[in-house]
Image (cartoon, grey):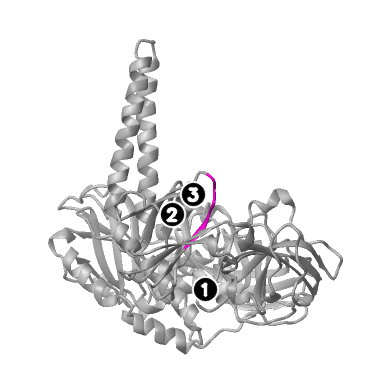
Amino acid sequence: MPQPARRALAPWMLLFFSWPLAAADEVRVAAGTVEEQRYTDASFGGLTVELQLTGDAVKDVKALRTKVKSARDDRGTNLYKPSKEDRAADFQDFSPNTRPGPSFKLSTPPRDASTIDVSGEVELFIPSRDPDTKLTVEGFLNRLDKPVASPALKAAKAEITPLSAAAYKARQAGNKPKKEDIIAEGKKHGASEEEIKQALAMIEAFSSLGGEEPSENSVLLETKDPDGRIISIDVVGADGKDLHSGSRGSQGGRETKLTKIDLSSKPPADAALLVTMRTNKSVVTVPVNLKGVSLP
Amino acid sequence: MKENFTRHALLAASLVAACLPAFAQAKKTQAKSSGPSASSPESAAAPKIGVAVDSLLDRRTTGDFPSPSLTVNLKLDGEDAGKVASARPRATRAVDDTGKSLIPDPAAKGTMMGSDSWQQAGESGPPALRLELSSPPRKAKTLSSLEGVVETYMPSRDPTSTVKVDGVLSKKDKPPFAAPALAAQRIRIQVLSKDGLEKQKKAAEEKKKAEAAKKKQKAGKKEGMEGMAEAMVEGMADALGGMFERLFMTAGENDLILKVDDPGKKLFGFDLASRDGKPITTYGTMEMESYRIVRIFEPIPKDAVLLVRLKTPRSFAEAPFSLSNVKLP
């Protein structure tokens, strides 16, 4: 590149790299409520440090995730040991009024500890920073049971398939955990017969809670999103206005998830899906360093 | 996906389990009461049971809600432990090693869950009990003294406390059954299916509407009363509808739905057994107005027997306990 062109590019490069920093500077993170659950069996429970976000940019944050880097109490106990299987958490919806707010989850400190130091980061999803975070899938109701064709989704390694009721129910039935699998899983973890029985009962109760049949008001989706790039999927009218959803439920994980969105009325044939995805430009990382946080 | 779903389901179960410490925690005895208790003059002879600490949960917070608390999970053993059908503990003294009393403020007790509820025995043994205390200071290391009483319900001590109703399923959607022992206590019990519940809902709504319509007629001549009466009709019908909706939502396919009339409050609870007397595991009974839903997750055998448990003086007893130096988690 010739020297003058390089010089002309320099201010833009500077602006590009300083943008995330500027947003990060506009958000400050402090410790909020600290909660601790101390069980006789120390493998249960733990310490939760709620994070309070302040600053002008907080109102633009639509989702976030937290990551602990280190945590020690004043007696030197390490309260965070990352496991090899750990992978980045999913982004969680955020609004300044959401309670409980974002948090760091740590191990239980000894009773004779009185304060802790924690460092980590909060990744903020700010969609207003990048128009490419929004993807509209028009006329999806006319193309049921076929994955949405979209270069943006492909680039994000994500797949969205609007489902017919029949396909949804078939997938749901195929995914229902078998009693034998649950018993085997329970035994693997050393659960007693009574505990397994109770777990089965609870799972049955949970299934019955979320087991409502899809109605004509339901929008049914299957998503595959191994990198957790999809932040939300909403149903909108042809005019782009949100079609009110009374409730929504989902089951599964990043690899495959079934979602049922129950609208207050039957969606019009020209309804569209409004997909919000995180992009590199839309995510700002704020470092967190909390010192001398008092334990309850 | 299947693996994910299974994991999801187990996670859901483990979340619930985390809220039910008695279910989730490892069994670890830390202290045990000194042995069979002395008898109480108010009730039948004290049962021969020992009370030991199973596990503890100290919930601490720098915030105001939820309130900090110490949950002590107790377990029963001893000669009579297997005969205890239901029990509930009550602490009379709880002091940590800093000298602080952990007996909750009576005004705050109402907000603590499970402190007054009876716990049923399970297939695995006697009832697992929970005591809710105040959270000790961080610097406390032990619960130096924990004293109290376990109230027990032991129907085997009094044959008149159990009324057996054979073939309970055959009584579904029929008029309330007439067992003499129940009639003597003025207790009426009707077994309902979900369809039967639906019919009761409609009948109750019609009745309320008719009653309110009568009131409306009476009040009709008075200015402004008509609207009020109409609103009253709708309000009552809505409230009834809401109650039945909740019943519907709550009742599982295998649950036993009962409508109970018990003016003297003589009923203690319900159990199920097979014809040969073998207990059928239930998961507690939910109460909603005059309805009871006995939770069961397997279909009830056709010849199942309903065991109606009654409150009789001889079926209740109290066992004091005294524990010391319980290590705090």
Q: Mark 2 points at which residue?
A: B292
B100 in the magenta segment: no
First in sequence: mark 3 vs mark 2: 3
Q: Which portion, as a residue range, is magenta? A: B264-270
Does residue A40 sit above or below B194 in this rendering? below
Identity of the amino acid at label 3? Ala
The answer to which quarter of the image holds residue A282 is bottom left
Task: Say if mark 3 contacts mark 2, CB within 8 Å.
Answer: no
The residues bearing labels 3 and 2 have C-alpha atoms spaced at a distance of 21 Å
Query: Which amino acid lies under the numbered mark 1 shown in the image of this protein?
Result: Gly
Residue positioned 26% across, 75% down in the render: A154
Name the mark on residue B122: 1
Relative horizontal placement of residue B129, taking residue B203 as reference (left or right): right
Q: Is residue A75 visible?
A: yes
Local SS, label 2: strand
Label 2 crowding class (10 Å Cα cut-off): few <14, some 14-19, many 20+?
many
